[in-house]
Image (cartoon, grey):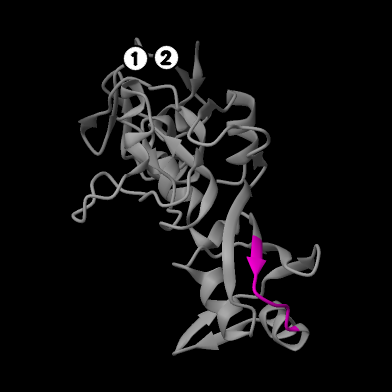
Amino acid sequence: MKLRIAKFIADSGITSRRGAEELILKGKVSVNGEIINTPVLFVDENDIISVNNQVISKRKDTQLFAFHKPINVMTTRSDPEGRKTIYDYLPKEYNHLKYVGRLDYKTTGLLLLTNDGNLAKKLTLPSYRIPRIYIATVNKINMAGLEKAKKGVTIDGISYQPMKIDILNENDLKVEVTEGKKNEIRIVLRYCGCPVRKLHRISFGIIELGNLSVGKIRKIPQKTIDLLTKSF
């Protein structure tokens, strides 16, 4: 199947489609030994494509998976303290996958995994403002504190962007963030008088956890991946 040259380059993981178009316009891309100057060109795996005089590898299909992370599990390859990691729950054929961002030891719910490091990086960039939605169970609800969180706060010199917060009941909040700073929900809600007892992620962009069982993995359809990444 033929693809636009910029899409082919982006799929190799070198850069984004926009970045590929810029490289083409700068004369940094050649196809079958000839420098090209327009992104309006279709290629396939039979073509020899070079970027900055380096032949890029054949196109790999990007894979993305949803994993239901259990509680008391580390999002890492190995833990020096010997605690269980997400890879202890994954079947061996998925051990090559990279995690997209992290969920902390106590946080449960949706964690994305991919074979594409470039995609993993982009999905976590604050500039893309991809929403992540959590259910936060708190010890108590402080209305004045929540109003602060909705406007954005600075804690110990670190600025946290405004959060979207809906009260579900006397102990549960629906919290939406786009920034992805480490432990931001726990830190901000504690600062605002609503210490978190449990934290559970239910969605990442358009991908939802749904009824996926704890410790199980589900492949994301290519159509959904395309929709998720259309702004890149």
Q: Residue at x 34, y 9 (%)?
A: 46
From the top left corner, tell me how far across and down residue 33 is, in percent: 26, 21
Stretch of the chain drawn in magenta: 136-142
> Is residue 94 visible to the viewer in this orientation of the structure?
yes
Location of residue 191 (image quadrant): bottom right
Q: Nearer the viewer, residue 42 or 110?
A: 110
Query: What residue sits right under mark 1 in the picture?
Result: 47
Kind of residue at disc 2: Asp
- Marks 2/1 in contact by CB < 8 Å: the verdict is yes
From the top left corner, tell me how far across and down residue 39 is, in percent: 49, 33
> Is residue 15 visible to the viewer in this orientation of the structure?
no
Residue 217 lies in the magenta-colored region: no
Instruction: Please rate how many residues cluster around mark 2, counting C-alpha atoms within 10 Å: few if below 14, some from 14 to 19, many from 20.
Output: some
In the picture as drawn, the residue positioned furthest to the left comes out as 80
Q: Secondary structure at mark 1?
A: loop
Tag shown at residue 44? 2
